[in-house]
Image: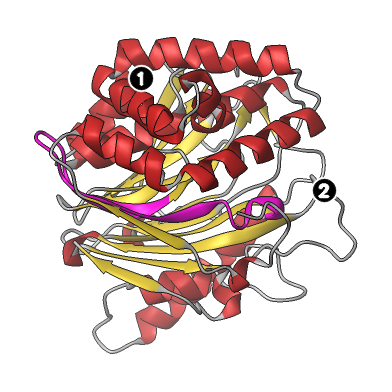
Amino acid sequence: MSTEFVPAAEVRPVTFAVHANDHIERGHRRGDELRTGIASTVNAYRRYFSHLSITEAAVHSAATSSWRRLQEWWPTGAEEVEAVAAGAGIDVTELMEIVARTEIMTQAPAAPTECSTVSHTSPGASVAAQNWDWAADFSTLWHFNDVGAVPGQHRHVGIAEFGMLGKIGLNEAGVGVLLNILKHTGDAAGGVPIHMILARVLAEAGTLAEALEIIDSASTSSSSIITVITAEAAVQVEIAGALKRERRARASSGADGETGESGFLLHTNHFLHPDLLDGALELRPDSTSQERYRHLAEAVVRFEAERALARGGRAVTVGDLTKLLTTGPGDAPVCCTPAPGATYGNRSATLVSVRIDPARKQIDLAPGSPADGLHGNRRFQL
């Protein structure tokens, strides 16, 4: 599998669909069937960590520490990760270089800006969407992830980087998760991997409350924002190292993009919860997070004005969210495209467009950004 840069919209991802009797068999099948992609992804992250000036010893130490934390926090998930490694023919600490890549990267001064997320809470009809931005050099190193249920776990569908059990997705109980990376002075390597928290929510959570309990129980060390979406509501959980705070749509209106009564919540890649602003950092000196957030907030205000004029109003759909997340030349780069001549490590791109409709048990996944027209979109019905 190539690790060279391929324009995201031109990627035609592998679909990994697995049905097994238990989580260990499922892990072995993942490792065996995806071993080429896993090997390519391990090599790609090693190159990337080196580019970020993280030594091999530091990578190994962080991966080993996160592996121990995972074993303590979610033994079942750790067993499945170990089975993936065995199926792929690699050591589990090598696989953890992918699974715990967010925690490993806390040791670097900067990382690619990634992700703009929009959700709308409407009881019984809440929806969410995201542009997943990452280094363009990883454009071929992800796949559609259709994970069959095993005893005690739900079927779930989404995207995953090769070697991960899960990432962004929706389960058959109607619980979905989206992810944005953040940066804080409290960050450190070695915590429970954020991607395993997502995987556990998708595997085990049957309600919004259960999802939030899983997230709260993890001993985290890296910063991220997890948006949990169910038909009833969307909740953002901001994580700053070991600290966690929730954000929900509130009954007020203001210029910060939380339109309140309409139920919109937005997030890019900077902290918003007042309790976590002390120590909050931008991902990198040239971060576009603030610019993207302002663009989305203004777009929501315009959308709400137009919706208010509609006779009797109407429900907000995933299509509406996609329009909010679509930008072109001259706009804030919510749809992220590598700059001409950008060098390795500085080529960020929207790799996947995601739309989740929990009430319909439906998730749409398209390579590239919504500005590319959602070509190659796959709609999964759970």
Residue occupying the point 90% across, 62% down:
341
User: Quadrant of the rendered structure where residue 32 is?
Assistant: top left
The amino acid sitting under disc 2 is: Tyr
Q: Does the rendering let one see residue 189?
A: no
| Amino acid type assigned to the residue bearing label 1 in the image | Ala
Q: Does 148 lie within the magenta span? A: yes
| 301 or 45, nearer to the observer | 45
Magenta residues (range): 136-159
Q: Nearer the viewer, residue 288 or 34?
A: 34
Quarter of the image with the C terminus in it: bottom left
Q: Earlier in the sequence, mark 2 or mark 1?
A: 1
Q: Which residue is mark 2?
A: 344
Q: Is residue 11 left or right of residue 136?
A: left
**Image location of residue 48, percent across then percent down:** 73, 36
Q: Position of residue 155 (x, y in %)?
A: 19, 49
Mark sitting on residue 218: 1
Side of 46 relative to 33 (left or right): right
Please name the residue shown 45% across and 35% down the image: 88
Residue drawn at the location 23% of the way across and 38% of the way down: 203
Q: Secondary structure at mark 2?
A: loop
Distance Cα–Cα, label 2 vs label 1: 33 Å
Q: Nearer the viewer, mark 2 or mark 1?
A: 2
The quarter of the picture where residue 295 lies is bottom right
Residue 269 place in picture, x, y as percent: 60, 43
The picture places residue 374, in percent across and down from the top left corner, at 50, 77
